[in-house]
């Protein structure tokens, strides 16, 4: 069975990222999205570029997968 994080990792590895960078990207996306304001995909990408990420790293598909992964993580943590 393929997991969401597995799909994210494969897609980002195909773009040349190493596991450490993948973890950092996910954390940066989480930080950008958790600022309390509604953030469009364009807004998220712009904020990531300000943090030093190249524009090619994240597309809408990967961003949606990361968002889903983060949502699942939040729900899981609330149950604990």
Image: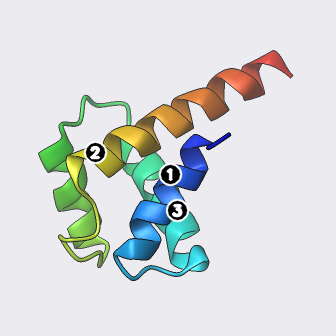
Q: Position of residue 62 (x, y in %)?
A: 34, 50
Q: Hey, which residue is sitting farthest left in the picture?
A: 42
Q: Position of residue 2 (x, y in %)?
A: 62, 43
- Give 31 or 73, whichever is nearer the viewer: 73
**Disc 3 residue crowd, few under 14, some 14–19, many 20+, Cα 10 Å:** some
Read off the residue under disc 2.
61
**Is mark 3 in CB contact (under 8 Å) with mark 1?**
yes
Read off the residue under disc 1.
7
Q: Quadrant of residue 58?
A: bottom left
| Quarter of the figure that contains the N terminus | top right
Q: CA distance from mark 2 to mark 3?
A: 13 Å
**Is mark 2 in CB contact (under 8 Å) with mark 3?**
no
Q: Secondary structure at mark 1?
A: helix
Q: How is the image coloured?
A: rainbow
Q: Which mark is residue 46?
A: none
Residue at point 41% right, 62% down?
Answer: 11
**Is mark 1 in CB contact (under 8 Å) with mark 2?**
no
| Quarter of the figure that contains the C terminus | top right
Q: Which mark is residue 9?
A: 3
Q: Position of residue 34 (x, y in %)?
A: 43, 38
In-image side of 46 versus 13 (left or right): left
In the image, residue 8 sits, relative to residue 71, either above or below, namely below
Residue at point 21% right, 57% down?
Answer: 45
Residue at point 22% right, 46% down?
Answer: 60
**Disc 1 residue crowd, few under 14, some 14–19, many 20+, Cα 10 Å:** some
Q: CA distance from mark 3 to mark 1?
A: 5 Å
């Amino acid at each position: 069975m393929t997991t969401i994080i597995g799909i994210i990792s494969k897609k980002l590895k195909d773009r040349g990222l190493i596991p450490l960078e993948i973890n950092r990207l996910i954390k940066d996306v989480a930080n950008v999205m958790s600022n309390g304001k509604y953030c469009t995909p364009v807004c998220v990408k712009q904020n990531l570029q300000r943090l030093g990420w190249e524009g090619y790293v994240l597309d809408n598909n990967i961003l949606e997968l990361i968002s889903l992964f983060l949502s699942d993580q939040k729900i899981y943590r609330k149950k604990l």
